[in-house]
Amino acid sequence: QKEVEQNSGPLSVPEGAIASLNCTYSDRVSQSFFWYRQYSGKSPELIMSIYSNGDKEDGRFTAQLNKASQYVSLLIRDSQPSDSATYLCAVNRGPNTGGFKTIFGAGTRLFVKA
Amino acid sequence: DADVTQTPRNRITKTGKRIMLECSQTKGHDRMYWYRQDPGLGLRLIYYSFDVKDINKGEISDGYSVSRQAQAKFSLSLESAIPNQTALYFCATSDRPGTGRTGNTIYFGEGSWLTVV
């Protein structure tokens, strides 16, 4: 079992719809959770972080965390063609331990059709 | 200009050759990392360094070595390249603990495409 699992996709949604990206993780002691966006041929960039159970909203993005179910998701409202990218889920065991303890999922490819 | 700069951006090399990927950063971060990315496998950590005198192996360090020449510079070497080292390589940085939760944010360079033939 991979430590961080994501559906590879592609996930295809029409413009204006809600895109829902999901991620599960295996290590129950994980404390920090992240979503990175990676455009084709580019480097990943952080778009959301979440540390507590529940929802966290930032503009059109909402991250949801359920530690009991070991599940984290990203919702993108009013999806735009510019949201088409690969979304990487990342999990860190510590509260502040940086990249050496961050485990990345393989990513989900999202296509938003105009 | 990018805060984390990698050179070269693209390189094709032959099996058995030595190749170095260089990374420099202007973010002032102490922590630096080298990752490789393969389709379906995500990002995997090769080596990391917390300061100039600190070098640590990641999950896939075999066949690689690194050098931390200065706080801002961290290079990755493939001593004898092999075809299964063909991948996209990323240098990255993060802040130190005690900087709040920003210590978890990883900042990536633009990536270096390496092809070993």
Image: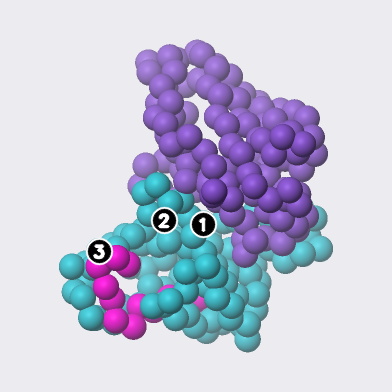
Between the C-alphas of marks 1 and 3, the distance is 20 Å
Closer to viewer: mark 1 or mark 3: 3
| Secondary structure type for disc 2 | strand
Nearer to me, B46 or A83: B46
Q: Of the two numbered discs 3 and 2 on the same chain, state the one appearing first in sequence.
A: 2
Residue B55: image location, x then y, percent = 58, 81
Q: Residues within 10 Å of mark 3 (few under 14, many from 20)?
A: some
Between the C-alphas of marks 1 and 2, the distance is 12 Å
> Badge 1 sits on which subunit?
B
Mark 1 sits on what residue? B108
Q: For the point 21% across and 72% down, which residue is it?
A: B13
Above or below A30: residue A67: above
Q: Which mark is residue B115?
A: 3
The shade of chain A is purple
The shade of chain B is cyan
The quarter of the picture where residue A96 lies is: bottom right
Q: Is residue B112 magenta?
A: no
Please count the marks in the image.
3
B79 on left or right of B55? left
Mark 2 sits on what residue? B37
Closer to viewer: mark 1 or mark 2: 2
**Magenta extent:** B73-85
| Secondary structure type for disc 3 | strand
Between the C-alphas of marks 3 and 2, the distance is 13 Å
> Badge 3 sits on which subunit?
B
